[in-house]
Image (tube, rainbow, N blue to C red):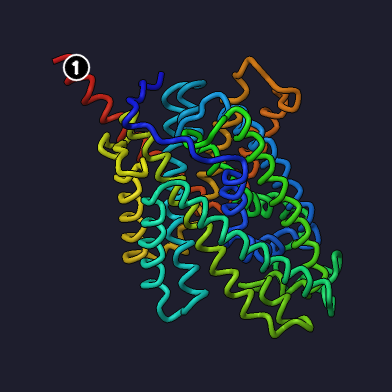
Amino acid sequence: MAQAIPEPARLQRRLGVVDSTAIGLGSMLGAGVFVVFSPAAALAGPWLLVAVAVAGVVAYCNAVASAQLAARYPSSGGTYVYGRQRLGEWPGFLAGWGFVTGKTASCAAMALTFGHYVAPGLATPLAVDAVVVLTGVNLLGITRTALVTKILLAVVLATLALVAVAAAAGPHAGGFTDFGAGRDIGEASAWGVLPAAGLIFFAFAGYARIATLGEEVKDPATTIPRAILGALGGAFVIYLGLAALLQWQLPAGQLARSTAPLLDAVAASPLHEFAPVVQFGSAAACLGALLALITGVGRTTLAMARERDLPPVLARVGGGHAVPFVAELTVAAVVIGLLLTSNVLTVVGFSSFGVLVYYAVTNAAAFTLPERAWHAPRWLNVLGFAGCLVLAATLPVASVSVMAALLAAGVVVRLLVLRRRGRAAGA
């Protein structure tokens, strides 16, 4: 069972429904929405909308499970805490370790994507600056984080509205089913729906940020379910609409190969002079997603440190704004280290596998809850658990191998630490 948290070490409940929903929606409408449709279209072809729907169904199952658990266990850490409480220490550890490692790589990739949008020749220095500035925002307190997230979210929503208007204006060179010419884009087919859904699911997964902030939400039993389901519903409508418009606007081959499909859709329309606005919105989306990622990883790190699954010093909370400053600074240092020493864009693929493991544990934990709302039957947890495993199994082998190796390394280190603690206790 979780240890009682002394009052000075607790975070403060300052987030309402609007702030919580904005953080979740800001996470889901991050840089992923500007790039995810191309690799998904290359896999699913004319079945892209089906892939979005499959990802949405699995995401809904996970969102309902997260909302149930977060309302009952409103503390920082998300599924790391739920897994420990409902299933035991090891499932909780696997969820937490998968989240921290996968999302730390995502932080670095998101920061570097921001740098590439703003000035490709200075991408790495700009990425480091972004991490430093946004970590500073987090250290000013969760209300400042929510305020900046809402500002960035407003910019992103305005940008997506511009893309929608431009795509609707034409010239509509694509087609929802015209993938006969798609022989030149690879093996796009109905068999690609599941791996495409796995990629799109990664973009949906931002609602986890609401659950990881459970200790900072007012009236969590009411606020968290509303915020999670509200953010997911908004993101699903936006994703489905954008996927349809992009298939209508761009030729199949161009959509599958594009590195910036939303920008291409505007550039091909009568509103092409607004293309720089889309670039600006993309940069804002990167910053919004990065801010939410750093916040979520920091809170999960805090929770794992409280249970001594990570060094206890990471559990320190302090300052006038009651933030986990040691965890936040450590996450920032690791992300900057990745930016300076590795090509993070080549390793971020394994994050999807880590996220799916995380939500498989979420569904398993929710299945054990005795009290259930009418909209959260147990079969929904079974469907979510199975969906996570299926999507994880269809991801590229390289991504699965890297994340499996990291999970195994974490298990081995924890076993060694537990053995050493047992010997020390018996001495």
Quadrant of the rendered image containing residue 154 = bottom right
The residue indicated by pointer 1 is 425
At which x and y percent is residue 67?
A: 62, 32
At which x and y percent is residue 193?
A: 73, 52
At which x and y percent is residue 153?
A: 60, 59
Residue at image coords 73%, 66%: 161
At which x and y percent is residue 183?
A: 77, 71
- Residue nearest the viewer, comparing 308 with 133: 133
Q: Residue furthest front?
A: 320
Residue at image coords 52%, 54%: 147
Amino acid beneath label 1: Ala
Quadrant of the rendered image containing residue 171 = bottom right
- Residue nearest the viewer, comparing 113 with 350: 113
Q: Looking at the image, is 330 positioned above or below residue 5?
A: below
**Count of numbered labels shown in the rendering:** 1
The C terminus - image quarter: top left
Specify whether 101 is left or right of 24: left
